[in-house]
Image: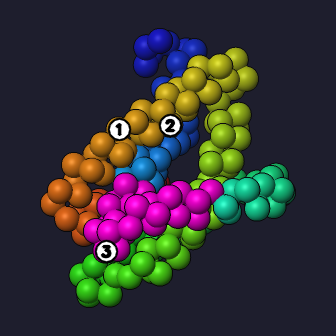
Amino acid sequence: MTEGHPDSILRHRPFVLFWFARLAVTASYQMLIVAVAWQLYALTGNPFDLGLIGLIQFIPAMLLFLVVGQVTDRYDRRMVLLSCQIIEAIAAATLFVAVIAGATSRELILCVAFILGIARAFEGTAMQIMVPGLVPVVLMPRAVAASATANQAATITGPALGGFLYAAGPTVVYGVCLALFASPVRK
């Protein structure tokens, strides 16, 4: 598959922008979760809180699965994605400002994790069903594979990058995540 080939997904600018946005947003989410977990553990020293972070992020997906389906079917999926990315950017900005102000608390981190879980529930579903509207039917298998590859690459590299950046401090991770969440919003 080359860029000049007529059957290339790279010739479809909306898909290429979507692919980069998916990569950026998924990596950013993974980095943010790693930083949140590290910061919560540094704050409390309680391993139970690490498990609580995962549970709090999972609960919205479990409780909202019927609502998520209805929203992504009834409303413009681009607007659903944009809304989720704005919420995630606000969450990263909240953590960034809280660290700078010295106002980070266990409750704040858990609340932000819950909000991220809600946004991620809608975002994940909307991203999966966006692809058919971005490329012709003949390119669907390639587009789905490329989208899944972006998701997997970000899911694998995001936590590693988040941990690496966390060595410089949580504000670095939160700042990078804020920039990544905001970058797809501008496109």
Sequence-earlier tag: 2 or 3: 3
Q: Nearer the viewer, residue 70 or 54?
A: 54
Q: Amino acid at mark 2?
A: Asn
Residue bearing the label numbered 2:
151
Q: Residue at x 48, y 33 (%)?
A: 152
The reply to whether discs 3 and 1 touch (Cβ–Cβ < 8 Å) is no
Q: Which mark is residue 90?
A: none
Q: Residue 184 at x, y = what percent? A: 45, 54
Q: Colour mode? A: rainbow
**Residues under labels 2 and 1: Cα distance?**
10 Å
Residue range in magenta is 32-58
Magenta span: helix, strand or loop, mainly?
Answer: helix
Residue bearing the label numbered 1:
157
Sequence-earlier tag: 2 or 1: 2
Front position among marks 2 and 3: 3
Q: Nearer the viewer, residue 31 or 1?
A: 31
**Residues under labels 2 and 3: Cα distance?**
31 Å
Q: Residue at x 42, y 50 (%)?
A: 30
Secondary structure category for the residue under label 1 = helix
Q: 10 Å neighbourhood of mark 3: few (<14), some, or many (≥20)?
A: few
**Residues under labels 3 and 1: Cα distance?**
25 Å
Residue bearing the label numbered 3:
43
Instruction: Determine if residue 43 is in view.
Output: yes
Q: 10 Å neighbourhood of mark 1: few (<14), some, or many (≥20)?
A: some
Q: 10 Å neighbourhood of mark 2: few (<14), some, or many (≥20)?
A: many
Front position among marks 2 and 1: 1
Q: Residue at x 28, y 79 (%)?
A: 99
Q: Residue at x 59, y 59 (%)?
A: 55
180 horizontally vs 7: left or right: left
Q: Amino acid at mark 3?
A: Leu
